[in-house]
Amino acid sequence: MKKLFGIVPIAALMLAGAAQTTLAQTQTDEVLVLNIQLNAVSQGPTTTNRAGVVSTSVQVRRITSADIIKVLGAATGNSFSTKAQLVLLTPTNDLDTWTVQIRDGNNQLDVSGFIAHQPGALEVGSSTFNPRTGNASGADYGVDSFTLQDQGGFPSLTEHFSVSGLTITSTRGVVRRGQVVGQVDRVDAQVSGTGDNNGGAVVIQGSVHAVGNSTEVITVGGDGGPNV
């Protein structure tokens, strides 16, 4: 599991009460905009021209973050504007722990159950540290997988995919006046795999990117659920 330098520290555990055993924790999450750009190739029709030449074709279409938002909106009974974004929240000290949301203005919908991320079993990495400023940076390389899947309690999606490929997860500090004041995280993956659209099989190739330069502090309650 990727655990790059935690430039922005996680706050300490706080007891909810002397008579309670439930723990609450504040957590600093990096906010990244998730950009998915895939090409889906499906089987096309077979035709015969006047000369008797038989041709079989394929069809290529794009799957973007906007398309995924529409698919998830239909499954969850929500209607989103064209300004809606897929947003990835990940703890600043553990970039493999994903919470995925659709954000449309002030509206937020957790869709983590539909969009799954699995880190690769083998990873290699690089890192640097500047003791003068305290700035740390690093990059991990692995073969990660990304899945758009059904979630229990909701209608089946009209689109599914399971893709994987070389994934670079990186982080660097933002230094101002000789001090680290923030953190920028990135996920860059070149992926391929398979899926389906309305039951029709597709072969998929493309990219998954996420870039962020802002943070949010959330409270994780005793039940383990985040309260943003």
Image (cartoon, helix red, strand yellow):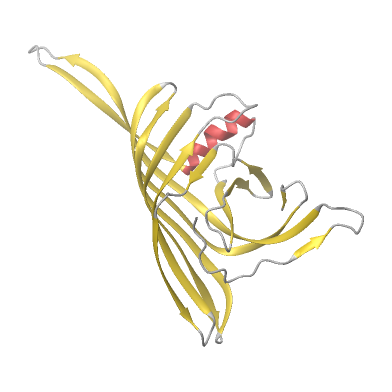
Above or below — where is 110 with respect to 202? below
- In which image quadrant can residue 69 be found? top right
Q: Position of residue 184 (x, y in %)?
A: 51, 67
- Across and down, in percent, residue 58 comes to 25, 27
In this picture, residue 52 sits left or right of residue 158: left
- Report the residue at 85% width, 57% height from top: 16
Give the residue at x 56% y 36%.
Answer: 114
Front-most of 168 and 80? 168
- Going by the picture, which residue comes out furthest to the right? 19
At horizontal 57% and vertical 68% (from top left) the residue drawn is 6
Q: Is residue 139 left or right of residue 44?
A: right
Tell me residue 179's x, y (percent): 57, 83
* Tally of numbered tags: 0
Q: 28 or 215: which is nearer to us?
A: 28
Residue beneath the point at 44% across and 46% down = 36
Residue 53 lies, in percent from the top left, at 10, 15
Which residue occupies the extreme left position in the image?
Answer: 51
| Nearest the eye: 70 or 121 | 121
* Residue 185 vertical placement versus 226 (above, below): below
Residues 169 and 4: in front is 4
